[in-house]
């Protein structure tokens, strides 16, 4: 299992798989083809179907254009077998002949992969990749999940997680201060500021929930506007973990060190899902994005409140279980409807999962690992129109209504 640095990526929105991944691929291909007169990029499947709304072409053109000419070819009806988010880069000389070619896939969270080639990024740093194994390790050693992270990653991981938290908190605060309309044809107004203001007028219980909503909206709206965020585990679900942790830090005055430890535990939960299933909406639907984010946030909250390793595992299991089957159907291919609202709702559900598990001793029948397996199976069974292609669900209803 990879380092948490591969899960928590700091970058700009609106999509880790459709924007961050293609931008990174364009940088790599350009670096080895500086002499090319033109670079053609063919986008396949889900990457092509909603690429306009996710600014895939903008990310690639902005990366390549200063150095050489670039052409974008859209093939939304062709799904390459390895993954729905396929790209083919072709470098051409002055005569138009292809001098280099590279087929690569954006597999979620900004990560790239090639068929038959080990995935890019760092080497495996975790020997155990199931939460059941790690839970047993915690019970045997008396330690908890964040200590396992430190043992595998080394103490230098805390410096990186401090940077992650700084970026997350900054996104919340920027988003709360912004007003106006989000980019794109939906003319969707920002709501974080108004939610935050209105929350102050309620009594403590409703105020708490309203504030959590506003924090999730703030980060998700920053993502939709191309602002700097952290994939947690993706851009499309980047508002859930920051919302929960920012709220708990503000309301309970948890120290930064405890927030970093909670981020380590949350990262472990996300990493397990990413390793054993997927966090790409184009591969498994939104259950892999918002569902996993909810599990991460629930586990982080439970740890902050003193939960045992078993209770933390239970809260993560509930966070993901109750998002099973969630489709990925962004209207107009934008990470706005229903994505932004889902982040706010999932943040609240994460706190509910934490509360529920805190009333138990942590014993339950269905493990987090089993739910991850089911998520993978469910994602495989979902028709492709419900996995980020913009052809089914809410996206289809919108397109029909506009015709």
Image: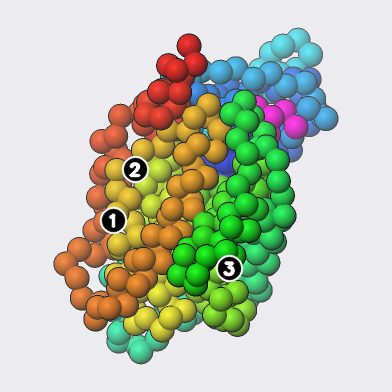
Magenta stretch: dominant SS?
A: helix
On the image, the x and y values in percent for residue 256 come to: 62, 79
Residue 170 makes an appearance in the image: yes
Residue corresponding to mark 2: 326
Query: Mark 2: few, some, or many residues within 10 Å (few <14, many ≥20)?
Result: many
| Nearer-N-terminus badge (3/2) | 3
Question: In the image, what residue occupies the spot 78% across and 27% down?
Answer: 65
Is disc 2 placed on a helix, strand or loop? loop
Q: Would you say the residues marked 3 and 2 are in contact, meaning their CB atoms lie under 8 Å apart?
A: no
Question: In the image, what residue occupies the spot 63% across and 30% down?
Answer: 187
On the image, the x and y values in percent for residue 295 come to: 39, 61
Residue bounds of the magenta highlight: 57-62
Disc nearest the viewer among 3 and 2 = 3
Residue 374 against residue 283 in the figure, above or below: below
Answer with the quarter of the image where residue 351 lies: bottom left
Question: In the image, what residue occupies the spot 40% across and 23% down?
Answer: 397
Q: Would you say the residues marked 2 and 1 are in contact, meaning their CB atoms lie under 8 Å apart?
A: no
On the image, the x and y values in percent for residue 286 come to: 40, 43
| Nearer-N-terminus badge (1/3) | 3
| Nearer-N-terminus badge (2/1) | 1
364 inside magenta stretch? no
Q: Would you say the residues marked 1 and 3 are in contact, meaning their CB atoms lie under 8 Å apart?
A: no
Residue corresponding to mark 1: 321
Q: Considering depth in this image, is 298 or 161 the residue closer to the camera?
A: 298
Is disc 3 placed on a helix, strand or loop? helix
Quarter in which the N terminus is drawn: bottom left
On the image, the x and y values in percent for residue 190 come to: 63, 44
Q: Which mark is residue 246?
A: 3
59 inside magenta stretch? yes
């Amino acid at each position: 299992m990879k380092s948490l640095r591969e899960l928590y990526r700091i970058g700009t929105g609106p999509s880790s798989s459709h924007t961050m991944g293609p931008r990174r691929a364009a940088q790599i291909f350009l670096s080895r083809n500086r002499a090319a007169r033109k670079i053609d990029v063919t986008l396949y499947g889900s990457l092509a179907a909603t690429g306009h709304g996710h600014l895939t072409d903008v990310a690639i053109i902005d990366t390549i254009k200063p150095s050489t000419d670039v052409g974008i070819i859209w093939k939304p009806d062709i799904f390459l077998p390895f993954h729905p988010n396929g790209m083919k880069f072709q470098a051409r000389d002055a005569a138009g002949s292809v001098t280099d070619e590279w087929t690569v896939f954006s597999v979620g969270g900004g990560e790239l992969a090639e068929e038959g080639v080990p995935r890019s990024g760092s080497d495996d740093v975790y020997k155990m990749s199931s939460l059941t194994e790690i839970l047993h390790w915690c019970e045997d050693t008396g330690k908890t999940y964040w200590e396992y992270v430190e043992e595998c990653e080394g103490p230098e991981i805390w410096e990186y997680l401090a940077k992650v938290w700084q970026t997350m908190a900054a996104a919340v605060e920027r988003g709360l201060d912004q007003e106006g309309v989000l980019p794109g044809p939906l003319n969707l107004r920002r709501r974080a500021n108004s939610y935050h203001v209105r929350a102050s007028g309620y009594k403590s219980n409703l105020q708490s929930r309203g504030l959590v909503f506003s924090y999730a909206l703030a980060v998700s709206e920053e993502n939709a506007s191309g602002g700097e965020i952290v994939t947690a585990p993706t851009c499309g679900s980047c508002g859930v973990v920051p919302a929960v942790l920012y709220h708990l830090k503000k309301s309970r005055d948890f120290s930064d060190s405890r927030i970093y430890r909670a981020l380590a535990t949350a990262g472990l939960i996300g990493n397990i899902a990413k390793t054993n299933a997927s966090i790409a909406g184009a591969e498994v639907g939104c259950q892999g994005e918002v569902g996993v984010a909810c599990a991460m946030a629930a586990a982080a909250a439970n740890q902050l409140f003193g939960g045992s390793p078993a209770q933390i595992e239970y809260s993560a299991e509930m966070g993901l279980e109750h998002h099973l089957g969630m489709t990925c159907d962004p209207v107009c291919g934008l990470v706005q409807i229903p994505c932004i609202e889902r982040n706010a709702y999932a943040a609240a559900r994460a706190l509910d999962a934490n509360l529920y598990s805190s009333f138990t001793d942590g014993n339950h029948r269905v493990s987090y690992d089993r739910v991850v397996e089911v998520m993978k199976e469910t994602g495989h069974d979902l028709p492709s129109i419900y996995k980020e292609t913009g052809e089914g669900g809410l996206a289809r209803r919108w397109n029909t209504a506009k015709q």
